Image (cartoon, grey):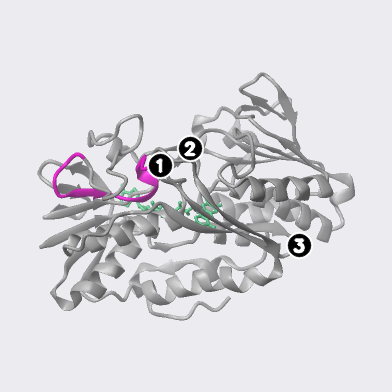
Amino acid sequence: MRVVVLGAGFGGLELTTRLAEKLGDDADITLIDEASGFVFGFSKLDVMFGRTAEGAVRHPYRDLVAPGVRFVRTTIRSIDPVRRRVETDKGPFDADVLVVALGADLDPAATPGLVEAGHEFYTVESAFAIRNVLERFEGGRVVVGVTSTPFKCPPAPSETALMVHDYLTARGLRDRSEIALAMPLGAPIPPSPEASASLLRRFAERGIAWHPDRLVRSLDPRRKVAVCADGGELPFDLFLGVPVHRAPAVVAESGMCVDGWIPVDPLTLETAYPGVYAVGDVTSVGTPKAGVFAEGQAAVVAARIVGEERTYDGTGICFVEFGDDEIGRVEVTFRRGERPFGRFDDASDRYRADKVAFGTDRVRRWFGREWAH
Ligand SMILES: Cc1cc2nc3c(=O)[nH]c(=O)nc-3n(C[C@H](O)[C@H](O)[C@H](O)COP(=O)(O)OP(=O)(O)OC[C@H]3O[C@@H](n4cnc5c(N)ncnc54)[C@H](O)[C@@H]3O)c2cc1C
């Protein structure tokens, strides 16, 4: 059985590792990605705020260890879900089972003024470059804003606002700065009212202005204001933005998308095409776009490929930065037709070790080495 996995992000890495564990040397698994290595989403914030070095958070694909998995670094140019064939810069690949795990693409240019006057912190390159921008920043009005829905890791803008506060405080610039957070959501983490309440308390204690239900449509580079969908404006000296998300063009052109993303059976992750699965951010499965959910879906697909009757339960755990080196733990379950439910463990320093272990465990399993922080 030839399994071809498109995309070596959270979903693709977990899927191929699980399959290799189950199939051993019998596996015929091809994993395709155009990047040279993997970077955790949370590492972008760590580099941006100078907590760690760029070189420490890149995990090169040449270190992949799963037996029976062939990694091919190339760009996927077309996907034929009916024939289960993909065309790449290194030629075609045919599959008996095809898994699409290509994530969400980011399109900063879709927001007028963002590239000229602001900085998006969701791509690796831009998040890393913001480190220098922050180092040069001498205080002023900082706006953290979101330009579209859905967007990855809904807690990330709240984490960023709190980390900006800590950063400016440490540099002695907080007194001459203002921080505002604008999100197109009614609460910082809608499925967890407790986590949202705790974050709102932190914002209030730190003087971070919270603007719920506000989507940033454009930036006016001349006037240095963020223009919101409701017509309101937020003046800024430094704008840190979440850019527009969309399915990668190669996925959109494959005809697999409905309303922008690939629909899947929420229990099995099967697409409308026999032998073709999709996991993670590229789907409209109903969970937030986050690595933990992509990974949980990948585990189910791996089980089903080898004939196990496993179904997806929609559960994920998120470690949320609350500032002051404290972390909150949110565990949420999303099931179609039900309100999301879960539990929240309030921020403290005891979850730092758990968050570190979350990263090191995955690096050990996927890349076979210890991740020194
Ligand atoms: C600032 C920030 C913080 C975050 N924090 C967290 C967190 O704490 N916890 C959490 O769970 N999630 C977090 N996330 C979200 C998480 O990073 C994503 O949701 C997760 O990576 C999605 O996994 P995926 O496998 O669906 O896609 P991805 O991990 O995005 O992988 C997709 C892969 O496909 C490849 N690809 C795309 N198109 C092509 C092509 N045409 N040819 C070849 N290769 C291609 C890409 O190179 C990429 O490697 C965060 C995200 C951000 C931006």
Q: Assess mark 1: CB under 8 A from ligand 1?
A: no
Rendered position, 59 above or below 340:
below
Task: State which tag comes first along the sequence, 1 or 2.
Answer: 2
- Disc 3, ligand 1: is the CB inside 8 Å? no
Name the amino acid type tagged 2: Pro
The foreground one among 149 and 94 is 149
Stretch in magenta: 272-286
- Quadrant containing the N terminus is bottom left
Q: Earlier in the sequence, mark 1 or mark 3?
A: 1
Give the x, y percent position of residue 244.
49, 36
Residue under label 2: 150
Based on the picture, tell me whether residue 281 belongs to the magenta stretch.
yes
Label 1 SS: loop
Closer to the camera, 16 or 76? 16
Q: Residues within 10 Å of mark 2 (few under 14, many from 20)?
A: some
Q: Is residue 295 left or right of residue 127?
A: left
Q: CA distance from mark 1 to mark 2?
A: 11 Å
Q: Estimate how packed mark 3 is, as few (under 14), some (14 to 19) or many (20 or more) residues with alpha carbons within 10 Å.
A: some
- How many discs mark residues in the rendered view? 3
Q: Position of residue 213 (x, y in %)?
A: 63, 30
Determine whether the beta carbon of the residue marked 2 sits less than 8 angstroms from the nearest atom of ligand 1. Answer: no
Q: Describe residue 362's horizontal placement relative to residue 226 as left or right.
A: left
Q: Which mark is residue 286?
A: 1
Residue at 30%, 38% (x, y): give it.
Answer: 263
Q: Can residue 21 be seen here?
A: yes
Q: Is residue 260 magenta?
A: no
**Residue type, label 1:** Gly
Location of mark 3 (residue): 324
At x 23% / y 33%, what residue is drawn?
Answer: 255
Image quadrant occupied by the C terminus:
bottom right
